[in-house]
Image (spheres, rainbow, N blue to C red):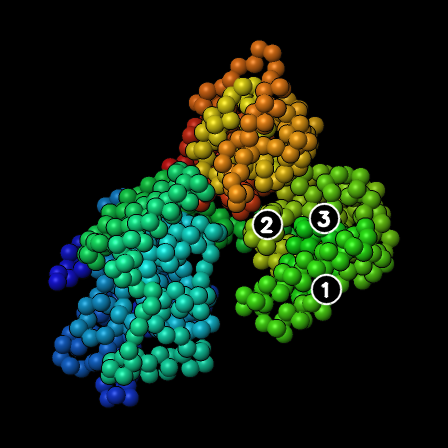
Amino acid sequence: MASAISQYSVGQFDSLLALSDDEVVTHSHVRDVPVPSGGVLALVTLDNGRDHTRPSTLGPQGLLQFARVMDDQAARAARGEIAAVAVTGKPFILAAGADLSKVGDIPSREAGVAMAQLGHYALGKLGELGVPSFVFINGLALGGGVEVALNADYRTIDRNAAGIALPEVFLGIIPGWGGAWLLPNLIGIENALKVVIENPLKNNRMLKAPQAFELGMADAMFDSASFLEDSIRWADGVIAGRTKVKRANEPGKLERAVKWDAAIGIARKMLEKRIGTVAKSPYVALDLLKAAKSSTKAQGFAAEDEALGELISGDQFRASIYAFNLVQKRAKRPAGAPDKALAKPVTKVGVLGAGLMASQFALLFLRRLQVPVIITDLDQARVDKGLAYIHGELDELQQKGRLDSDEANRLRALLSGTVDKADFADCDWVIEAVFEELSIKQAVFAEIEQHVSPEAVLATNTSSLSVEQIGAELKHPERVVGFHFFNPVAVMPLIEVVNAPATDDATLATAMGVAQKLRKNAVITADSPGFVVNRILAKLLGEAMHAVENGTPFEDVVAAQRHFGLPMDPFVLLDLVGLKVGAHVLDTHHAAFPERFFPSAALHELAEAGVLLEKDGKGNPTGIDKKAVKIVAKHRPEGARPSTVAELTARLEDGLADEIHRMLESGVVSAAEDIDLCMILGAGWPFQMGGVTPFLDRVGASERVFGATFHDPRIQGVG
């Protein structure tokens, strides 16, 4: 059988070295380890010479060094000097794949193809050494780090390793160093679809070691304390023939004949339904996984080369790098954040409300802050219902193994409920989650202020009301701050921290510190209607309802927004947030900006009737309900003219460009990057689109509306 890497030669990668002058090189250090059976195992350790804060990455210099080391080991194996080769990493880290900051600088499709070929050339040598090869996954393994392991014959994993993932699809590319061919042929197509496509599109979900082991990505799992020793001992058993490796998930003839194509077909339909067809990388990955059923390794590697080269040189990957840098860098250094030293300690949390949202808050604070949490509501029955929900969630987490019994019991002991607001007296942080009506929020804060200390922070989860007005009648409005979560609370990574005119730095610093402890990304916004995410979504939803009220078919409105790449169309989004909530949001924005935001009488009637979407037996939307079409038609103004898809698309683009430009001019946030960060983390704006402001630059809306762009096109990294 022909070698899978014989199609590559070392000389073809010279051009890549010119791009890697400042590469932080991950070196391949070799030491010989005698094994109990009497042979020698060559142990290669990947190490970039930095501490654990800088994971090892694989650039051209590092990959070529790895290839040379593998060639040396192959020569030693041919001479009978070694019985096997194993690769591991520096403490807690195997490798984090390619350095994305460098990959983003690749200048052409040809260079992108060469980078893919270099990965195959170097890592592929693990499968052609002439002796067994092993990878000991001792910690973080992302992208190319996972592919290092996949190219070997056998793998072990540290039981405590976290951060095992192939995140490439999330970033607008594909696993291009063997992952798209090797993984499905190792663990089966359904498991591979989960790792390559499903997990990346779920906010880049990663695997822990037991999950990776269960999928079959590793052949053995050992405890951290003796991981390396146990891995070497296990490898020696394989070398000597004492240990037989069985892979339950490795695909057989039946899977290839029947299940493979069916799984691909189901995945394609789910993708189209969930994300539409704007994003390229998930579908390219799907095609590669489909072809892996019957192609040879050499054919699979060649297909990855072409696919990766095409995607790396395209707009969507450069847009993804811009978005990636926002999340990895700007989100960790929020603009406008005061000195962390000003933050007040939070030793007890109070939650005003015991409904679903309030109970989700309580659970999150309980798990992340590990401090006493108390909830309250209008009567004991509501409080008991909220407590029961939280206890049920803790039980479920324990059953899933995400909490052990000791921790679950400790969290239960920290939780309490009351109808007596005096029990909030020692709370340092109180957050309200009551109905979105100004007078109600003012009333609950006025009542609780009588019981808590003047220094206690009062946080409001309002989505569009004025934080200043909510605290206006309090004795200490300086300790009121907006703390706007997104639903579902446990999953969505954004919190909009609203800095009202009276909010002092200590309160703001405390809010930022709490957000960090909750493992959320916080963006500071001014106290302006809708803040960032809801103001932009209100623009889209208002235009959508205005269009259908004027006779534009619902289907055309959906089509006009499709190229934004948002995870759901405007009517599905309205159904998700609730029609009454949606109507309230549109009314709030119309009241604030009557010349630019449309209210919707039709939406109010739809909310009263409780009708918009038709759904199947599982609650999935299947279309617009005919009753909803009739209700909307009743509100059509005389002489109204429907819009074409092209007209509405341009109107939406220009409307967003205008609104965002106004938001920046009035200082709602510090920069366009903060708008993009909010939309990516709070509204699911796709990484592949690079944020809303670069998108509006690319389609020309910025130029049309205000005669400039949000970003200098030479540096924005998109398009």
Q: Residues within 10 Å of mark 1 (few under 14, many from 20)?
A: some
Q: Are marks 2 and 1 in contact (CB under 8 Å)?
A: no
Looking at the picture, which amino acid does disc 3 mark? Ala
Q: CA distance from mark 2 to mark 1?
A: 21 Å
Q: Which amino acid is tagged 2?
A: Pro
Residue placed under numbered mark 3 in the picture: 433
What type is the residue that disc 1 sits on?
Leu
Name the residue at 48% across, 41% down.
567
Rounded to the nearest angstrom, the CA distance separating label 3 from label 1 is 17 Å
Give the residue at the far front of this rendering: 617
- Seen at 44% across and 54% down, the residue is 199
The N terminus - image quarter: bottom left
Query: Position of 684 compared to 463: left or right?
Result: left
Question: Label 2, on which residue?
Answer: 488
Q: Residue at x 55, y 23 (%)?
A: 547
Q: Which residue is mark 1?
A: 415
The Cα–Cα distance between marks 2 and 3, rounded to whole angstroms, is: 14 Å
